């Protein structure tokens, strides 16, 4: 593919925006980059905001990263969130993990050491400040200025308004340029694809959701996890286990605990694994600790407990680490997934799943929620008494897992295939010739 030159109008607008940014920042203090090697190395850049997007696009990204590494390229994983570096490196040990600071000049500094040949945006944002993450336009601009190919995979639109004046200016100046600088767009569905075409995107393919291809139906071996002793002790104990993942809001936390408190009386050996969405937030953890203390349920925090066997008298394990939820879902007797989050991971293990109603139709989790709900794979309740009754009945329903397995297999046969369609779209633009795994 021959790179398209940047237009004169875009160059002028970029110079103006750069001048305003320099005045606002007053220095390059926000610029971050890895230590400079002797010369810039050819690199694959991937913006993947959170561990959720990394897992959701893994079938494609893992193969692409392997291909780039085999060609002698460095791997750069960009994230705008604190706290994901350890999880990213555990999955891709040789990658440079770079936190996006918000500085418009960070991309220039990064490219001076790790020059992009291909820049991939994983799922979001499809244009400036659309999603709950921030990727400065400068990364796309710098990649195209240097002749890199650019792609958006598993694309999804949130429709968020901008959160500050600087983001509003960036979107006004560069939204159409953002889309035009992306060589190929792979969208999850027709609505997203049509919106991006109307907004100026060049080449748009409807590929489906790679998340359906990313499901692991078999648990990882304990020795390949970060908590082998802890996980093995829970499995060996045979305790009925409720795993509540991505519990974001205080009312959802209270719903889960209000349902579990009577369950712990009715089923004395029951264990709750509670994974808050933002364990890095001190206020979230303080509020959770206060609520647990009030409940009287003995609890431990995974970060403090470490990887050691769990005592039988512990009723609640607070999973306050990053990147481990999937391994605990694999042990769950029942899973509860926080509203608007990923329900496929526990369903893949044929685990009964409960959720609250009222999911946000703009979130990328919504089509999956809607499909699985309509397929009879979800239990919905916003009432703790009803939820506790359902949980208790599920613990004694031996036929439920087979029913879940059969329904899940049928759903997957219908929904899978996005990874291969994404490869086809990429090959239509880029000279990718090797076979992928």
Image (cartoon, rainbow, N blue to C red):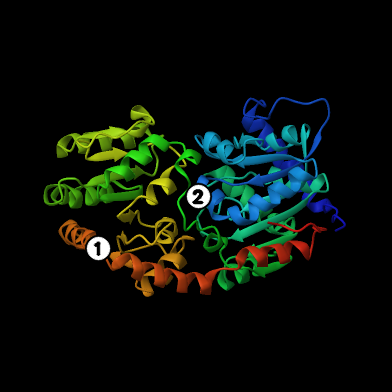
Residue 267: percent from left, percent from top: 15, 50
Above or below, 320 relative to 198: above
Residue 234: percent from left, percent from top: 31, 42
Few, some or many residues within 10 Å of mark 2 (<14, 14–19, 20+):
some
Few, some or many residues within 10 Å of mark 1 (<14, 14–19, 20+):
some
Query: Reading the chain from its start, which is encountered first: label 1 or label 2?
Result: 2
- Front in this rendered view, residue 156 or 265: 265
Q: CA distance from mark 1 to mark 2?
A: 25 Å
Instruction: Identify which residue is drawn at 68% across, 39% down.
Output: 76
Outermost residue to the right: 2
Label 2's element?
helix
Q: In the rendered image, which residue does mark 2 sit on?
A: 52
Left or right, 158 with respect to 287, comes to right
Instruction: Identify which residue is drawn at 74% across, 55% down.
Output: 181
- Front in this rendered view, residue 147 or 429: 429
Outermost residue to the front: 236
For the N terminus, the quadrant is: bottom right
Q: Which mark is residue 381?
A: 1
- Front in this rendered view, residue 134 or 331: 331
For the C terminus, the quadrant is: bottom right
Q: Which mark is residue 313?
A: none
């Amino acid at each position: 593919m021959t790179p398209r030159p940047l237009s004169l109008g875009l160059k002028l607008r970029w110079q103006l925006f750069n001048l305003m940014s320099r005045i606002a920042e007053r220095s390059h203090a926000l610029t971050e980059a890895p230590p400079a090697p002797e010369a810039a190395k050819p690199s694959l850049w991937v913006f993947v905001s959170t561990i959720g997007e990394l897992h959701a696009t893994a079938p494609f990204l893992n193969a692409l990263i392997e291909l780039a590494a085999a060609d002698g390229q460095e791997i750069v994983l960009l994230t705008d969130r604190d706290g994901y570096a350890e999880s990213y490196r555990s999955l891709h040990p040789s990658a440079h993990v770079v936190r996006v600071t918000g500085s418009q000049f960070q991309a220039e500094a990064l490219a001076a050491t790790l020059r992009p040949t291909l820049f991939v945006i994983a799922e979001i944002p499809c244009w400036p400040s659309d999603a709950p993450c921030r990727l400065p336009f400068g990364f796309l601009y710098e990649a195209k200025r240097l002749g890199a190919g650019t792609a958006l995979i598993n694309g999804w639109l949130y429709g968020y308004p901008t959160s500050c004046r600087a983001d509003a200016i960036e979107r006004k100046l560069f939204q159409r340029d953002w889309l035009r600088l992306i060589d190929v767009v792979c969208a999850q569905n027709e609505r997203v694809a049509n919106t991006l075409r109307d907004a100026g995107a060049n080449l748009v393919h409807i590929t489906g959701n790679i998340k359906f291809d990313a499901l692991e139906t078999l648990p990882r071996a304990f020795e390949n996890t970060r908590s082998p002793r802890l996980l093995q002790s829970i499995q060996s104990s045979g305790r009925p286990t409720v795993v509540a993942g991505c519990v974001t809001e205080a009312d959802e936390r209270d719903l889960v605990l209000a349902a579990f408190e009577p369950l712990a009386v009715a089923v004395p050996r029951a264990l709750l694994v509670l994974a808050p969405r933002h364990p890095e937030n001190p206020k979230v953890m303080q509020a959770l600790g206060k609520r647990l203390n009030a409940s009287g349920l003995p609890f431990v925090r995974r970060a403090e407990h470490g990887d050691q066997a769990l005592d039988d008298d512990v009723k609640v394990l607070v999973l306050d680490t990053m990147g481990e939820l999937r391994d605990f879902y694999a042990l769950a007797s029942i899973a509860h997934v926080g509203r608007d989050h990923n329900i496929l991971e526990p369903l893949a293990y044929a685990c009964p799943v409960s959720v609250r109603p009222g999911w946000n139709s703009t979130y990328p989790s919504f089509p999956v929620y809607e499909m699985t709900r309509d397929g009879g794979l979800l239990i919905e309740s916003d009432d703790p008494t009803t939820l506790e009754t359902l949980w208790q009945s599920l613990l004694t329903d031996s036929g439920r897992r087979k029913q879940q397995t059969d329904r899940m297999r049928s759903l997957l046969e219908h929904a899978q295939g996005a990874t291969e369609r994404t490869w086809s779209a990429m090959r239509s633009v880029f000279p990718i010739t090797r076979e992928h795994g």
